[in-house]
Image (spheres, grey):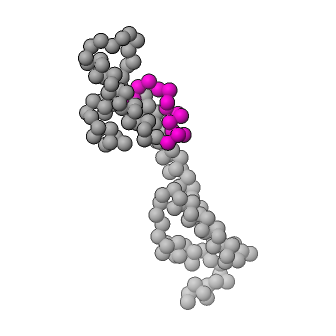
Amino acid sequence: MQTYLNALVYEIWEAIKNGYTVASMPITSADDKKAYESNLKAKNAIMYGLVDRELVKVMNYESAKEIWDKLKSIHERDMKIEEAKLQTHRTQFESLKMNEDENIEAYKLRVNEVINMIRGLGEKIEDSVILKKVLHSLTQRFDSKVFS
């Protein structure tokens, strides 16, 4: 998004970076008009790229900088939450062990559930890693099959 805003016009990114204070009296100078227009163009460009649930969170802000800062904080929070979830699922994957009373299908479902959660959060996990994990975590009754 930053690249897109930079590419539009230099003043648009400057309005976001430096901020804009909304004038309380009518704007008369050319510089003030330019700053006002740049702020509006920046707001328009940002809001045009948002989905409804994000737009609702920022639509009452007056300056493009306020919108930009709010979106940054929202996405930084989301990234931290996703990283925490990913760490939890990685730990679950590492600690997977087949229970003695569990059949292979039930275990496979548990493994797939954890793998799908990890992949759903954007991390790639190789099939060979999954296979090694499953083979090493089977119970002793499957040792003869694992060795073959």
Q: Residue 113 at what x, y percent from top left? A: 61, 64
**First to last magenta residue range:** 51-65
Asked if residue 121 is positioned above or below residue 104 in the image, the reply reads: above
Position of residue 138 in the picture relative to residue 53 (left or right): right
Position of residue 86 in the picture relative to residue 101 (left or right): left
Quarter occupied by the N terminus: top left
Asked if residue 44 is positioned above or below residue 25 in the image, the reply reads: below
Q: Residue at x 49, y 42 (%)?
A: 51
Which residue is nearer to you in this view: 97 or 1? 1
Position of residue 65 in the picture relative to residue 107 (left or right): left
Task: Confirm whether the magenta stretch covers residue 60.
Answer: yes
Q: Quadrant of residue 137?
A: bottom right
Q: Residue at x 33, y 25 (%)?
A: 37
Whether residue 69 is visible to the viewer of this picture, yes or no, is no
Task: Confirm whether the magenta stretch covers residue 82.
Answer: no
Q: Quadrant of residue 22?
A: top left
Which residue is nearer to you in this view: 114 or 38? 38
Q: Residue at x 67, y 83 (%)?
A: 141
Asked if residue 75 is positioned above or below residue 121 in the image, the reply reads: above
